[in-house]
Amino acid sequence: MVAYSQCEYSGISLASAKAIEAARVDRKPWTGETARIWRNRGKCPLTPNETAFILKALAIPTNTTIYLAAGDGLMELEGLTSVYTNVVTKSSLLSGEDFTTMHGNTKAALDYYVSINSDSYMATYFGNMDKMVAAMRVFTGLYKTIFLNRKAFALFTSQGFKGKELTEALWKVHRDDFIMGRGSALPDCFCEFNL
């Protein structure tokens, strides 16, 4: 989703920036104040680095197996895979020929199938696919779903939060989201709260 958004991203590798630019075709990213406002509203998808940071802040074990339902090859995933080493993608599940000949809709169907049947589901963006997956998971009784708070992440980082201060702030905001019923976050991540 990062590649298809019009969000501006700093701190990504040159290779990722080039891949994003190529995928955008003629859609130019917002810049300046518009970019800042859009990001602070939580409208920008998280990068692999940002996702890994938030998962660590939520104390998600680094040996967790993660199926990445995303476009393969559009961004370098080292920011995520260097921390969470059990990351599986469509291209790692399928043979090279099967993957390259598979139509985009079929790839999306594979992502949907894996996402609705996984033990847990975590959304880094809340687009149409995420909404359908979350609804189907609730319908089938698979409640372990978490929506990463992009707005809080953008707000805290724009205020200069880093390291432990950022980790603690992200943990608290996700705990509060869980308590308030925004998403049905993984309960074992938030065992330290009192109502």
Image (cartoon, helix red, strand yellow):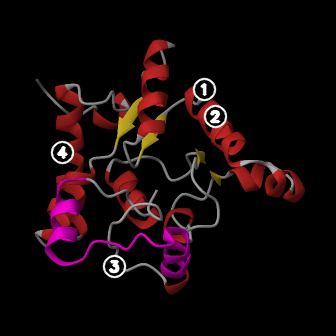
Residue type, numbered disc 2:
Val
Query: Residue 114 shows which numbered tag?
Result: 2
Q: Residue at x 38, y 58 (%)?
A: 46
Q: CA distance from mark 2 to mark 4?
A: 28 Å
Label 2: how many Cα within 10 Å (few below 14, some 14–19, many 20+): some
Residue range of the region highlighted in magenta in the rendering: 16-42
Can you identify the residue that label 3 sits on?
10
Instruction: Using residue 22 as the reference point, say whether residue 5 is left or right of it.
Output: left
Disc number placed over residue 194 in the picture, else none: none
Separation of disc 3 and disc 1 at Cα?
A: 34 Å
Q: Which residue is mark 4?
A: 173
At label 3, counting other C-alpha atoms closer than 10 Å, the crowd grade (few under 14, some 14-19, many 20 or more) is few
Identify residue for label 1.
117
18 displayed left or right of 146: right
Measuring from the top left, give residue 70's x and y in whole percent.
57, 52
Residue 97 in the image: x percent, y percent?
89, 57
The reply, left or right, for residue 120 in relation to residue 155 is: right
Residue type, numbered disc 1: Asn
Marks 4 and 3, Cα distance to the nearest angstrom?
Answer: 24 Å
Amino acid carrying mark 4 in the image: Val
The answer to whether 86 is drawn above or below residue 16 in the figure is: above
Q: Is residue 164 above or below residue 141?
A: below
Q: Position of residue 172 (x, y in %)?
A: 18, 45
For image coordinates 74% across by 55% down, the residue present is 91
